[in-house]
Image (cartoon, helix red, strand yellow):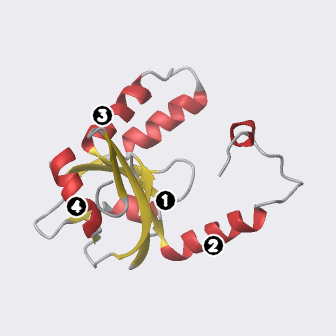
Amino acid sequence: MGKSGIYQQNGDDIVFRGFNKISIDNKGRVAVPSRYRDLISVQAENNLVITLNPLDRSLWLYPLPEWVLIEEKLAALSDFDKQSRQTKLMMRGYASDCQLDSQSRILIPKELRAYAELDQAAVILGQGNKFEIWNEQAWEAQRDEWLESVGDDSVPTPESLQSLSL
């Protein structure tokens, strides 16, 4: 077990987890929480890729080595399948390289800030191989909506979750 919020298995697999409130400055910069900085420095040489999340109005932030794997998966998708093509267009088209500066901040491009409706208050959530960045109020509303639907018998449980034991 590494620092709180990070787990390394066999020294290779990186799993980011945890929740942090973050601030976005007037220039669109955000400081990566300190508990992740050393690992990003070592594993990704401070190189990250940020793109839009095509499923929600949030952003995905990947360490560069993880993004390379995503690029390979995207390249394998067919351009003749409409949903695959749209996913490729959105994720690749809005992907932006970024690097931690001397103060461990990244600059979120204006277009991505607008898409995710990011202003001053945001949250960053560790999601295994990446982070999600949300507008704080949007996250709280979405989280509450999801929590209210837990146990709702009118919504069928997806097959992928039926065997999950927590």
User: Does dot 4 land on a helix, a strand or a loop?
Assistant: helix
Observer-nearest of 82 and 43: 43
Pointer 2: what residue?
Answer: 141
Q: Is residue 16 above or below residue 23?
A: above
Q: Nearer the viewer, mark 1 or mark 3?
A: 3
Q: Nearer the viewer, mark 4 or mark 3?
A: 4
Would residue 20 be visible to someone looking at this image?
yes
Pointer 1: what residue?
Answer: 58
Q: Earlier in the sequence, mark 1 or mark 4?
A: 4
Extreme residue toward the right, this view: 154
Q: Is residue 119 left or right of residue 99?
A: right
Pointer 4: what residue?
Answer: 37
Q: Is residue 66 left or right of residue 81?
A: left
Q: Is residue 59 above or below residue 20?
A: above
Q: Nearer the viewer, mark 4 or mark 2?
A: 4
User: Does dot 3 land on a helix, a strand or a loop?
Assistant: helix
Q: CA distance from mark 4 to mark 2?
A: 29 Å
The amino acid marked with disc number 3 is Val
Observer-nearest of 20 and 100: 20
Q: Residue at x 81, y 60 (%)?
A: 151
Mark 1 crowd level (few <14, some 14–19, many ≥20, 10 Å Cα)? many
Mark 4 crowd level (few <14, some 14–19, many ≥20, 10 Å Cα)? some
Q: Residue at x 70, y 66 (%)?
A: 147
Q: CA distance from mark 1 to mark 4?
A: 21 Å
User: Does dot 1 land on a helix, a strand or a loop?
Assistant: loop
Q: Confirm or deny contact between disc 1 and disc 3 (CB under 8 A).
A: no
The amino acid marked with disc number 1 is Ser
Q: Earlier in the sequence, mark 4 or mark 2?
A: 4
Q: Residue at x 67, y 71 (%)?
A: 144
The amino acid marked with disc number 4 is Arg
